Amino acid sequence: MSTDPYGSLEFAIGTKDDFWCFDYHINGDNVTLHAVINSETGGFIMNAEEPVTVPKEEAVEVAQHYVDNALDWLFEAGDPLEHDTEGWNQDPQYFVRAVKNAILHSTYEVLQRIVEEGIP
């Protein structure tokens, strides 16, 4: 199995028109992470981050790096764009929590998709 961020659209940061989407896949002691940009206003879809396979111990840090880059991209988009928490039904850290949860548990548990600021 491989990653398919744009196909699954399970994890996303941005607006309905301009966003990063993420995916991960666990294979034994390694995790493959991948991020794609979809820009309707720019008219393109491209890899934001090429798929990378890292040991489980590094996966949460890489996921956080992807999220930080996505938030920077939104801010640097000219007129800063805001993440649409309600539209995507997730806060920007949902991907990081999902990767961490998947590593710590043998089965995927349902995660809280929106966590209020200041609450872990």
Image: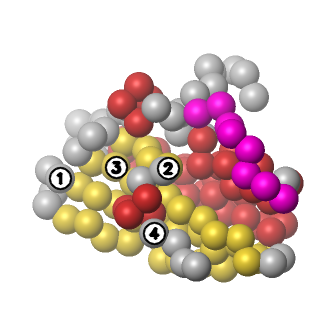
Q: Examine the residues drawn in magenta and state their main secondary structure.
A: loop
Residue visible at 45% across and 63% down in the picture: 5
Q: Which mark is residue 40?
A: 1
Q: CA distance from mark 3 to mark 4?
A: 15 Å
Which callout, 3 or 4, points to the residue nearer the camera?
4
Instruction: Name the quadrant containing residue 29.
Output: bottom right
Instruction: Give the magenta range.
Output: 106-113
Tell me if mark 1 has few (under 14), some (14-19) or many (20+) residues whose alpha carbon lies within 10 angstroms of its own.
Answer: few
Q: Label 2: which residue?
A: 11
**Depicted 98 relative to depicted 112: above or below:** below
| Spot occupied by residue 8 in the image (x, y as percentages of width and height) | 43, 59
Q: Is residue 72 visible?
A: no
Specify which label sits upstream in the sequence, 1 or 3: 3
Q: Indicate left or right for 65 with 10 as reference.
A: right
Regarding mark 1 in the picture, which secondary structure is present there?
loop
Q: Which mark is residue 19?
A: 3
**Depicted 54 relative to depicted 42: above or below:** below
Name the image quarter holding the C terminus: top right
Q: Answer whether residue 52 is magenta in the image.
A: no
Q: Label 4: which residue?
A: 4
Tell me if mark 3 has few (under 14), some (14-19) or many (20+) residues whose alpha carbon lies within 10 angstroms of its own.
Answer: many
Q: CA distance from mark 1 to mark 3?
A: 9 Å
Specify which label sits upstream in the sequence, 3 or 2: 2
